[in-house]
Image: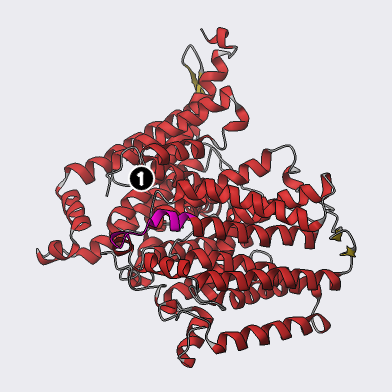
Amino acid sequence: MFELLGIPPQALFGQLLLGLINGSFYALLSLGLAVIFGLLNIINFSHGAQYMMGAFVAWMLLTYTGINYWWALLIVPLVVGASGVVIERLMISRLYHLDHLYGLLLTFGLALIIQGLFRNQYGVSGLPYSIPVELSGGTNLGFMFLPNYRGWVIVASVVVCFATWFAIEKTRLGAYLRAATENPTLVGAFGINVPRMITLTYGFGVALAALAGVLAAPIYSVNPNMGADLIIVVFAVVVIGGMGSILGAILTGFGLGIVEGLTRVVYPEGSAVVIFVIMAIVLLVKPAGLFGRTQ
Amino acid sequence: MTTQSETGYRSAAAALPVGTPRHHLVIFATLLVLLLLAPSVLYPVFLMKVLCFALFASALNLLLGFGGLLSFGHAAFFGSSSYVAAYAAKAWGFNPEFAILLGVLAAAVLGLVIGALAIRRQGIYFAMVTLAFAQMVFFFALQAPFTGGEDGIQAVPRGRLFGFIDLASDRTLYFVVLAIVFGALLLIYRIIHSPFGQVLKAIRDNEPRSISLGYKVNRYKLAVFVMSAALAGLAGATKAIVFQLASLTDVYWTMSGEVVLMTLLGGMGTVFGPLVGAAVIVTMQNYFASFGAWVTVLQGAIFVVSVLLFREGIVGVLAKWWKKPL
């Protein structure tokens, strides 16, 4: 069948895999954005910069202290997430009574600062981060060759996405969170510390971005601009999915990654813009997004 | 976290009266005299850069400060217009006035398409949608055959205005650019103070009420979006002729951020704020160019400080002291 279309199956599955990998990052990042947006009502423009920080901190741990990938998976989200907590306490918390757009502008400014600092320190050429030994090599699936690390990234992000979805939709803590999104004053009156919950939510969202950064480090070269372009694609993913649901962020993320991969097989020039084209169509047909609730 | 759209950046312009206050006329006249004298003191090319960005920021301010719509993708109009003007002047040998006009037209059409889609979402979504579309324009500029990819369109001829005024001299070109920008600024001023501008402010301050009063809110939003896009295009096309270059920087999303920064720093919703903001940022970039990425850090820091402590911007604060709308 594939030969009829003039596309060798190897190329098709290769691009599908690449799409699935990109989709993993779209899903993780748009999930983090959705979690932050849900409770803080702020579009975290520094999400891309925080993803980049995740990759860089992993690289620094390995280069300066010799701490390996597996520890980095644990330490990096904690460190970068903590920086998020500080940012929320010092800056973002002062903006809640203002128009939402100020949050966007503030986090945009933060992104510029973070990217500028890393560019000063490390230049733009990109630093290598090798794949951990345990995951080097690949597996022959019969129809295609799957590099182990890429398989691991897909599995890891599916697990993290599912765990986050489960925590928010099915646990008591998640119930508090969702209630606080609806009515922070009322939830506060029940004795729940809403400001602390907001701070920790921001920290968690940032930690998700940082985790995505660690996962990305061995695949893409670690450089200060790695988050800058990605974040805009993720914004498009978010608009397509609709901010209303966690599940929407995850499914749209993976789905669009695959669509992008398929486009690269059929019409390579269009792969960079296909997501934006889909966004335009979705805005025409369903302005609230595929999974969004209409206000 | 409830919506309080009454607070925030809307306050600075809230008191702007209908008609033209005398002190605005005085400021415009002083500004014109100063700008006419400026090239004998300052480098004309630098001044032209300031003028182009002042117009770009004023165009964004028309949308953001008076329409309440934050476009984070205005580089799309600025940049694509500069590409069209540069291509028309270089490849087709258009006179500069027609090249610029074609650029403005292209920006307006693009503004109509993007605007029609973007106004379907509000607030932060609107900002994200405009940003995403601008990125689409960026990829187009990167890949399309006539844009020169990474190199952009270089060595654009400045040509002869109306076929007989040679623009090769920086000084001659300066006065042409001054005429274009000053004329456009007066046009923006006129738009703001027209009945259309008043409806716009009403929509910005309370959209549901404007709808209930019977205004077709989306038409007003789209109209101001197209106007803003066309004026941003005018700035971009003029810049392409001045610098004889259309490049990817002009259409990249950081440019959209820069122009928002100029407007924020100068004072959103004030008449003269964007001019001051553009002058400050362009001057800063010119003098700190040797510090490399520290300029980005500094711009980010100005952003953060402006949002946290200085939301009215320079002109907004001045207006407060002087107790008159500026």
Residue B304 magenta-drawn? no
Q: Looking at this view, is B274 or A207 the one in front?
A: B274
**Mark 1 falls within which chain?**
A
* Mark 1: secondary structure: helix
Which residue is situated farthest in the left direction here?
A190
Residue in the image at 66% along x and 85% along y:
B29
* Residue B22 in view: yes
Amino acid type, label 1? Leu
Q: Residue B315 at what x, y percent from top left? A: 53, 82
Can you see residue A43? no
Name the side, left or right, on which A172 lies relative to B220. left
Q: Quadrant of residue B3?
A: bottom left
Query: Which residue carries the number 1 mark?
Result: A31
Q: Nearer the viewer, residue A181 or A113?
A: A181
> What is the quadrant of residue B229 in the picture?
bottom right
How would you rate the neighbour count of disc 1 (Cα within 10 Å): few for under 14, some for 14-19, many for 20 or more?
many
Q: Residue B21 in the image: x percent, y percent?
A: 52, 86
The image's colouring method is secondary structure
Picture residue at 83% right of the left edge, 54% below the top = B95
- Left or right? Give the position of B54 relative to A230: right
